[in-house]
Image (spheres, rainbow, N blue to C red):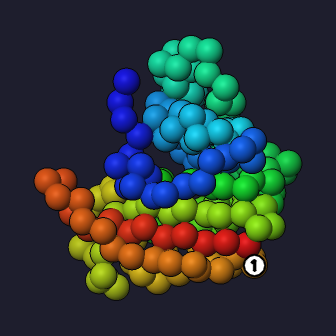
């Protein structure tokens, strides 16, 4: 089985102890399974039914609730419902014209007292040559997650050597 994201594994996350977690754009489920193994009651979604089918196939008997859902039109019951939300590499894959809506949607999942983790390719340039996807996020875009009562706890750039996008954002927010 593929390992969860190295940048997620590097975070010193507390035991879930049954708290609720949501993984945005979960793909084949590697990060969702990691959070479930830490004791989080994990829901993981993707817009792709194929990705959800693959996650279920790869992780038979999993406690993770894999769901087909649209980030820009999520279930209303998810608003402010999760103690931990992971956004890893999804917003950077979206065209710039819908990023603001996506950033707001991600933040809306975080419950009072909850945490949002954002992991993404980084750029420090305000302009881009437009090639992509992915389109690395600017610091301004990272800061934009601090909306609707979310506040930034920390943000750093971390190295991702031997990758095509060698600088990554690691940002933590709380409500």
> Total marks drawn?
1
Location of the C terminus by quadrant is bottom right
Position of residue 62 measured from the top left corner of the image (x, y, whole percent): 61, 22
Observer able to see residue 73? yes
Q: Secondary structure at mark 1?
A: loop
Q: Relative to residue 57, is residue 170 depicted above or below?
A: below
- Residue with the most extreme right position: 77
Question: Of residues 73 and 138, which is closer to you in this image?
Answer: 138
Position of residue 22 measured from the top left corner of the image (x, y, whole percent): 66, 47
Position of residue 100 measured from the top left corner of the image (x, y, whole percent): 58, 71
**Residue at (47%, 31%) from the top-left corner?**
28
Location of the N terminus by quadrant is top left
The residue that label 1 is drawn on is 149
Which quarter of the picture shows residue 98?
A: bottom right
Which quarter of the picture shows residue 112?
A: bottom right
**Residue at (34%, 85%) from the top-left corner?**
126
Position of residue 43 measured from the top left corner of the image (x, y, whole percent): 68, 38
Q: Relative to residue 126, is residue 160 depicted above or below?
A: above
On the rendered structure, is 94 left or right of 37? left
């Amino acid at each position: 089985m593929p390992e969860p994201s190295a940048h997620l594994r590097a975070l010193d996350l507390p035991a879930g102890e049954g708290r609720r977690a949501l993984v945005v754009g979960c793909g084949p489920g590697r990060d969702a399974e990691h959070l479930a193994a830490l004791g989080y009651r994990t829901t993981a979604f993707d817009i792709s039914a194929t990705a959800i089918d693959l996650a279920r196939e790869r992780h038979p008997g999993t406690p993770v609730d894999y769901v087909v859902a649209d980030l820009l039109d999520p279930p209303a019951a998810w608003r402010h419902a999760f103690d931990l939300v992971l956004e890893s590499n999804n917003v950077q894959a979206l065209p710039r014209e819908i990023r603001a809506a996506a950033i707001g949607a991600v933040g809306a999942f975080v419950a009072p007292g909850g945490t949002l983790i954002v992991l993404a390719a980084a750029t420090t340039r305000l302009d881009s040559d437009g090639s992509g996807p992915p389109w690395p996020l600017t610091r301004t875009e990272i800061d934009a997650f601090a909306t609707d009562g979310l506040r930034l706890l920390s943000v750093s750039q971390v190295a991702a050597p031997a990758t095509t996008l060698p600088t990554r954002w690691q940002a933590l927010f709380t409500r």
